Image (spheres, helix red, strand yellow):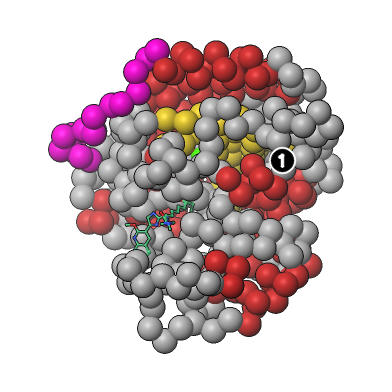
């Protein structure tokens, strides 16, 4: 023994691939893989890499992608060429193959590489967990929750989360999936609709006619036929514009607390989509970095193996703040880092304010109106409690 040991506590691994960040969906497309570069630069500037195991992730193989996706779809994804002229929102082709090539899921240079790298990071993270080498494994390049078995959807082509959970299921009897992206985690929910080994929980903005993808009502809890073991194993928390940290924290702790008690998962997969933050280009909530991070803290406190995925997030400076704070929570150094961004942070001027925790006023000027009455939130908690009567570990 050399006598040199890591500090006691959680073993955290960090999985990324700089090649992934170089891809572009198109000039005006809200999904900017560059936000991963900005996030990493802030995480490294705080020195957090010294408290984690850092890995450059592999690209997932065709066989690994095929653990969830159809080979027809993968073969097409591997051969389609980018279009010379990108479509705009007004010019949508109505008969796209596998929903590829529209404005949401454009065909761009290196698309297949981008997808397989995102899935590779998620899978590497899951494998560090199942090998008992990490307590928390982080894959900010993953979290693409809308992709279906044979269809791209909402900026997502390959469902890295489903692939990672399938890997966890080889070792663990039950996995809890939690999704705090502002959009409904429909692809992951659907993939595990007919099993009682995965419980999916999504918190999202719900407005069937005006907000993507339009699914995830409170009483959509999995196909309700008697012979489906997956019945009651989908939990949906539909929310309105402007929800605050305090309300979200109350909902999250009460719902996830009850679920962990009843379902007794052996591992947690948490999708940390940062488009639920105030000031997001697509999102509509009033969450701050602290409130978003509180979800990670709560999951960590459950003391179960934990995989953290990225997801949405369309105001890169806020994405970087959230995922940096959440990396610090994983490590356990959140109370010891400076709220002032390190002076040597690359692209420091991108952050506008020099703090990790801007106030709502700094982010928005005028906060978005909160359309979540306390009474409705109580109803949601009540519904979930009743739903859980049908669930057993
Ligand atoms: C190109 C250029 C594409 C500008 C897409 C916002 C754009 C959007 C764009 C956009 C946009 C959506 C829909 C409409 C489906 C369509 C990573 C036919 C300013 C996980 C995916 C949202 C969210 C898809 C992904 C949504 C995630 N919103 N500008 N597209 N109908 N698509 O509404 O959950 O964050 O908006
Ligand atoms: Ca969600
Ligand atoms: Zn989203």
Q: Nearer the viewer, residue 291 or 39?
A: 291
Q: Position of residue 355 (x, y in %)?
A: 26, 40
* Residue 207 image-quadrant placement: top left
Determine if the C-beta at disc 1 is less than 8 A from ligand 2: no
| 283 left or right, relative to 301 | left
Q: Check residue 355 for magenta coloring.
A: no
**Vertical comparison of 365 with 260: above or below:** below
Q: Check residue 368 for magenta coloring.
A: yes
At x 36%, y 39%, the residue is 277
Which residues are the magenta region? 359-375
- Of the 4 image quadrants, the one containing the C terminus is top right
Q: Is residue 308 visible?
A: yes
At x 46%, y 83%, the residue is 83
Q: How many labels does the image show?
A: 1
Q: Where is residue 138 in the image (x, y as percent from the top left)?
A: 58, 47
| 225 left or right, relative to 94 | right
Residue picked out by circle 1: 193
At x 56%, y 52%, the residue is 146
- Of the 4 image quadrants, the one containing the N terminus is top right
Q: Where is residue 305 in the image (x, y as percent from the top left)?
A: 70, 35
* Pointer 1 local density, CA inside 10 Å: few below 14, some 14–19, many at least 20: many
At x 34%, y 66%, the residue is 89
């Amino acid at each position: 023994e050399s006598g040199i040991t890591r500090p006691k506590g959680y073993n955290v691994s960090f999985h990324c691939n700089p090649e992934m960040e170089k891809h572009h969906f198109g000039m005006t497309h809200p999904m900017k893989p560059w936000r991963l570069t900005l996030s990493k630069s802030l995480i490294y500037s705080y020195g957090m890499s010294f408290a984690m195991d850092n890995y450059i992730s592999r690209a997932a193989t065709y066989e690994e992608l095929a653990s969830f996706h159809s080979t027809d779809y993968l073969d097409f994804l591997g051969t389609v060429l980018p279009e010379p002229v990108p479509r705009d929102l007004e010019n949508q082709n109505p008969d796209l193959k596998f929903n590829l090539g529209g404005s949401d899921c454009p065909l761009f240079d290196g698309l297949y590489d981008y997808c397989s790298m995102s899935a590779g990071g998620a899978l590497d993270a899951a494998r560090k967990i199942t090998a008992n080498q990490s307590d928390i494994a982080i894959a900010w390049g993953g979290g693409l929750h809308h992709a279906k078995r044979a269809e791209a959807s909402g900026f997502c082509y390959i469902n890295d989360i489903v692939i990672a959970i399938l890997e966890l299921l080889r070792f663990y009897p039950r996995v809890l999936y939690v999704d705090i992206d502002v959009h409904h985690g429909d692809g992951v929910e659907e993939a595990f609709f007919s099993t009682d080994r995965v419980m999916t929980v999504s918190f999202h903005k719900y407005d069937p006619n005006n907000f993507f993808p339009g699914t995830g009502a409170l009483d959509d809890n999995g196909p309700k036929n008697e012979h489906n073991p997956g019945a009651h194993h989908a939990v949906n928390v539909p929310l309105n514009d402007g929800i605050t940290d305090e309300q979200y924290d109350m909902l999250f702790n009460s719902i996830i607390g009850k679920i962990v008690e009843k379902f007794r998962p052996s591992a947690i997969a948490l999708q940390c989509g940062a488009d639920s933050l105030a000031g997001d280009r697509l999102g509509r909530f009033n969450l701050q970095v602290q409130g978003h991070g509180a979800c990670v803290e709560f999951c960590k406190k459950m003391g179960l193996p934990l995989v953290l995925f990225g997801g949405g997030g369309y105001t890169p400076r806020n994405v970087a703040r959230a995922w940096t704070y959440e990396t610090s929570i994983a490590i356990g150094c959140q109370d010891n880092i400076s709220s002032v961004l390190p002076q040597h942070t690359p692209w420091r001027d991108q952050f506008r304010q020099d703090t990790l925790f801007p106030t709502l006023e700094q982010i928005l000027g005028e906060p978005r109106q909160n359309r979540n009455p306390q009474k409705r939130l109580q109803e949601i908690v009540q519904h979930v409690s009743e739903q859980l009567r049908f669930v057993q570990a």
